[in-house]
Image (cartoon, grey):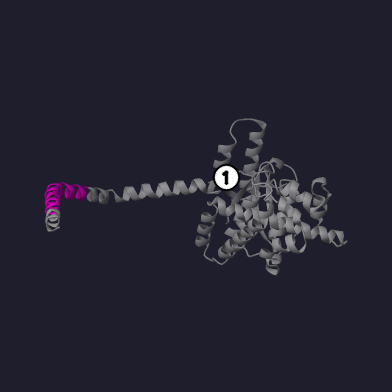
Amino acid sequence: MAGEKQEGQSWMAHITLAVNILWRKINPPLMLAMSYLVSTLWCCKERLLTWWMAYCQEKFKGNLSVADDVAVFSYCAQEWKGETVQAKRMRKAYEALFRRHHVKCIRQVRGDNYCAIRAVLFQVFRKGLSFPSWMKEKDILKIPERLLFSQGCNWIQQFSFGPERYAGPSVFVKLRKSIDALKNQWSEINSTKDQVERDELCRTLFSDEDKEYKLYEAVKFLLLYLVMEAHETMMNGQALPSFFGILFARDTSADPLSFMINHLNPVGDTGGLEQVDMFLLGYALEVKIRVFRLFKIDTGEFQAYYPDEYPREWHEVSLVTEDDRHYNIPIFKDK
């Protein structure tokens, strides 16, 4: 036993000696190399820092669903080249935006089927607008529970979350998460009074697809809730804002279920909001949505408001569209 212990100690001594000899041999060149590397990095620190910041900004920008400002004529020149009738018409419309309406820049919005909701909600958040009055009066987190369980609206299980069609029994949990995300994000941004900080919060939020899609699905559901409320009001013979008459006059949205199936479920998947749905969006968020409809240049429909009847205290957000399907954000000279 003692012999084995002594033999083990002898091996350890040999290993320690070998390591010490190896370290003495490699230590000077290793230290020299490390010293050279540190000095090189120090000399190039500014260039490396610039590269790293540019890399991060480019990576971040690639995910941003609302792009930075681009001068209106630069944007137009990039999008509408050539001498076709349509190109000339669009160039004339963008010039009218600049000359007559003092739009200096365009913020391009990601062209998916959430773009109308995204463009409006981005401006609501960036301006730091507060919750609509009706949302303050109701606990919006409890709306899914009340509709599904108290009022027995089981058909809401057919609600689609963008490309995820017919959520089924999981709809309640998904709606609660979406509405909770909307309420929390809106509260956080609204409570941030510094514009620079608020811009940064918006930039972070609108570069995270998972977070922002929850917001849009929450808005979709709240639109459905207001349509359900309006339909009940109409059935009781009470007055409604005029656009509800147009909405319920469509064969495809004569009642809340058909409205959900034919108009809300496609949003984020195969289609966006139609014009009458834009009235509903402005009504729900309590903002007057001013839209420059560029393809209607030289007509009385070049500008439209959604809704066209609104209280004076509502704030205004502005959009630009070339086709009533995709929307960008105009930036005015005095803003």
Q: Position of residue 50 (x, y in %)?
A: 36, 49
* Depth check, front residue: 279 or 164: 164
Q: Does residue 276 appear to the left or right of 12 in the view shown?
A: right
Q: Does residue 27 appear to the left or right of 292 in the view shown?
A: left
Crowd around label 1: few <14 · some 14–19 · many ≥20 (10 Å): many
Q: Residue at x 74, y 43 (%)?
A: 299
User: From this viewpoint, which residue is outermost toward the right?
Assistant: 237
User: From this viewpoint, which residue is outermost toward the front?
Assistant: 1
Eyeballing the image, is 309 above or below 301?
below
Q: Is 19 colored magenta in this rendering?
A: yes
* Depth check, front residue: 214 or 185: 214
Q: Does residue 11 appear to the left or right of 117 in the view shown?
A: left
Which residue is denoted by mark 1 in the rendering? 72
Q: Residue at x 56, y 52 (%)?
A: 210
Residue 306 seen anywhere in this rendered image of the structure: no
Q: Position of residue 296 (x, y in %)?
A: 71, 42
Magenta stretch, main secondary structure class? helix
Q: Is 196 colored magenta in this rendering?
A: no
Residue 227 seen anywhere in this rendered image of the structure: yes
**Count of marks overlaid on the render:** 1
Q: Secondary structure at mark 1?
A: helix
Q: Position of residue 4 (x, y in %)?
A: 14, 55
User: From this viewpoint, which residue is outermost toward the bottom?
Assistant: 137
The amino acid type, in three-letter code, at marker 1 is Val
Eyeballing the image, is 76 above or below 101?
above
* Depth check, front residue: 315 or 262: 262
Q: Residue at x 21, y 49 (%)?
A: 34
Magenta region, residue range: 10-36
User: From this viewpoint, which residue is outermost toward the top?
Assistant: 83
Which quadrant is the C terminus positioned in?
bottom right
